[in-house]
Image: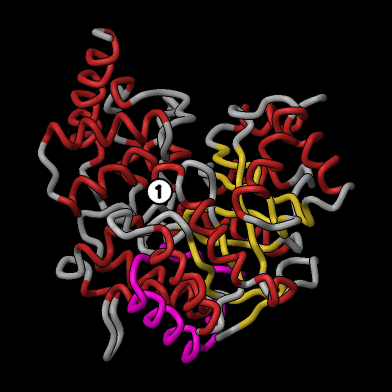
Amino acid sequence: MIYKTFGQTGKQVSAVGFGGMRFDMSQPPKKNAELLLYAREKGINYFDTAPKYCNDKSEDIFGIALKQMKSVRDEIYVSTKGSPSDMPTADKARKAVEKSLKRMKVDKLDFYFVWCIRKLEHFELAIRKGGQYEGLLKCKEEGLIDHIVVSTHLRGSEIVQMLDKNYFEGVLMGVNILNFPYRWDGVQKAHESGLGVLAMNPLAGGVIPQHEDKLGFLAGEHETPTEAALRFCIGCPEITVTLVGFSRREHIDTACRIADNCRPLDAADIHRIREHVAENMDSLCTGCGYCLASCAQNIPVASYMQFYNEKLLTDKSEAQTIESLKIHLDWGVLVDRAAESADCIECGQCEEACTQHLNIMERLRELAGWEKHVKEQKSKK
């Protein structure tokens, strides 16, 4: 296992982290808890979960395992999360921390995430006077939390804005071999600022292993696209911990084997991978962002195209696509949009700027139709 220093904390954490949101809920809790014990045997020492994961059972599963790991508690690192919208006051933040401690059967949390920052307004809510961050600081003073960190779905440029405020010691963001140009400036900003950087969804939420036939170009010699995606995140010096959701021992074996044999990537490697992915993605958006500066309507074109990637890869029906779009509009890459797809005036500037010459205007028209359906569904409720 590779171990890396988490920002300026001095903590040596495993390059592979155990993500607690993919348990097989058809299995009993004790069976799922055995996965954490097995992961520890394989060298993983970073364990991450959150309330609401796995039908709100994940923290309890962690508690079963962590109770058994009490003798090595000083050798492992545990994190959980709380969103500012769920705990808008310092008092509610404190109660949430206490509840997680009780459920997970630990005396302190090594890392606590201000969770699910989807808009900069959510960040402002967290840090306002008497808010969540103030409550977490109090918990830190009392030894209930070691480090306050942040989990975000913001675009890279917005992550930079948030991190410039210097509130956190680490940042968790969705970054993988397919979308990393979309958030890479945020990754670099965090790394250069001396923060720990955690990657969530390194397999694009399961898209990569589920569609290896379409993503074969990601793989090097003698590896699968899934293994290549894990190698990318684990090997990036800018990424401290790659959180992988495990549901079987074989998944742990694969991630740990890659970490055991992974050499660090350098700037030239990152550039080469960026170019290779861009050349082979054909109809998929690489997230380079060149289209954004050209849009007079301030439409988050790259975000819409990132969503469209999902549609192209998964072959979802129109109904399924509309349902997925609804989630992204409320929670995903489109939540903080300044304008909508229907606002496109078809000036063509985005297509001129696109390095892949994608039919962006046609896709925005299609997206506008789906977005209209989402609005109609909401109006009926």
- Say which residue appears at 25% left-offset and 51% top-offset: 357
Q: Residue most toward the top?
A: 380
Reply yes or no: does residue 226 show up in magenta. Answer: no
Quadrant in the picture for the C terminus: top left
Judge whether 86 appears above or below 107 on screen.
above
Judge whether 126 appears above or below 225 on screen.
above
Reply yes or no: does residue 264 show up in magenta. Answer: yes
Quadrant in the picture for the N terminus: bottom right
Q: Which residue occupies the foreground of this view, 126 or 364?
A: 126
Which range of residues does the magenta coloring cover? 240-267
x%, y% of residue 319?
A: 13, 31
Find residue 30 and report its image quarter: bottom left
Image position of 272 (left or right of 68): left
x%, y% of residue 309?
A: 26, 49
x%, y% of residue 5?
A: 71, 74
Find residue 299 and report its image quarter: top left
- Say which residue appears at 53% left-offset and 59% top-offset: 62
Element assignment for label 1: helix
Q: Which residue occupies the foreground of this view, 219 or 3?
A: 3
Q: Which residue occupies the foreground of this view, 179 or 358?
A: 179
Residue receiving disc 1: 54
Q: Amino acid at mark 1?
A: Cys
Image position of 136 (left or right of 49): right
Image position of 289 (left or right of 147): left
- Say which residue appears at 32% left-offset and 54% top-offset: 25
Judge whether 311 appears above or below 187 on screen.
above
